[in-house]
Amino acid sequence: MKYNIGLDIGGTFIKGVIFADGKPAGEYELPTPQTAKLDETLEEMVEKLVQGCGAVFSAVEGVGVGCPGTIDSEKGVVVYAANLHLENYPLKQKLEKRISIPVKVCNDANAAALGEAKFGAGKEYSDSVLITLGTGVGGGIVIGGKLFEGNKSAGAEIGHMVIERGGDRCTCGRYGCFEAYCSARALTRRTRWAMEDDTSSDMWKTYSYDSADGRTAFEYMDSDRSAKRVVDWYIKYLACGVANIINIFRPQAIIIGGGVSAQGSRLIKPLKKAVESEIFGGSGYAPVEIKCAELQKRAGAYGAAALFMQ
Ligand code: BGC
């Protein structure tokens, strides 16, 4: 039996999965530790995953790791991951020293794109783009079944395409990025502003300024005008970003993941409608499917494991 492991480093949890002969065979999760303990925690996860399915280290072909931020995949170095406070962190080197198994590192959302393409919503397509709408906005491009990571495999940064020149400031320092408008954080901020502007909004019935989040406006969109306006605002910007990606890559499918995708058809239906009119030359000739991700929180770990199965 041949094994592959995938680890996805998130802001709060590290998700791990082990595959046996290409099939999921076990999972394990630990809270994300402080930077100093990262390699130790990853080693512990590898041990637990291997033990969990009665395997031995020598039967593991490789360990793939997904990490937010800029990754030098060739060297396996985390060049910069703001959320994790990592800079020039030699992850591959550190982990290989501990476990003596080959390690590959890639951007988390790029890994998730590969995960969805191989095992989830993108299975039927050779060309797909995943967009993750979470705390940040990330994404990945799969062309001909393979992850496209660009020069030095730095990884696609879909969330940092500008969709409103001179617009809201992004965490990356630019203004008007896709992330600054379409992350769960941006949606939460907009919802709270709408509540402040409209003290008679139904949203106040259940939520306070601080407890309102990215779900609040969707919850009230059918009964409350201010909530509906927030959702319309969000869909308008999301459609702009999605249409840009469609016009550049002409993928067969756009897969929407991340926390906001839990809205399902409440998000996808109006999004499809809004995107339709922005596709260059119309969508008749090269139709594109817009759908929700299927693997949810597992996508990144599945894709990281697949780095050794491409
Ligand atoms: C980061 C990406 C990451 C995404 C999802 C963005 O803010 O720039 O590198 O993939 O968040 O975690």
Image (cartoon, rainbow, N blue to C red):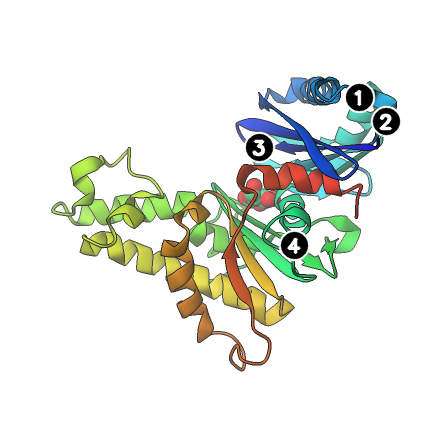
> Gap between marks 1 and 2, in whole Å?
7 Å
Residue designated by label 3: 10
In the rendered image, residue 301, in percent from the top left (x then y), is placed at: 65, 36
122 relative to 72, above or below = below
Label 1 or label 3, whichever comes before in sequence order: 3
Horizontal side, residue 309 vs residue 179: left or right: right
Residue designated by label 2: 59
Instruction: Kindly tell me whether mark 3's CB lies below 8 Å from ligand 1.
Output: yes
The amino acid on which the numbered mark 3 sits, given as a three-letter code, is Gly
Label 4 or label 1, whichever comes before in sequence order: 1
Instruction: Kindly tell me whether mark 4's CB lies below 8 Å from ligand 1.
Output: no
Q: Tell me, for residue 123, which label it has, or none.
A: 4
Tag in front: 2 or 3: 2
In the rendered image, residue 156, in percent from the top left (x then y), is placed at: 65, 53
Label 2 or label 3, whichever comes before in sequence order: 3
The amino acid on which the numbered mark 1 sits, given as a three-letter code, is Ala
Horizontal side, residue 205 vs residue 151: left or right: left
Horizontal side, residue 287 vs residue 2: left or right: left
Image quarter for ligand 1: top right
Residue at (51% x, 67% y) in the render: 243
> Gap between marks 4 and 1, in whole Å?
28 Å
Residue at (70% x, 61% y) in the render: 126
The amino acid on which the numbered mark 2 sits, given as a three-letter code, is Ala
The amino acid on which the numbered mark 4 sits, given as a three-letter code, is Lys
- Quadrant of the rendered image containing residue 274: bottom left
Q: Are marks 1 and 2 in contact (CB under 8 Å)?
A: yes
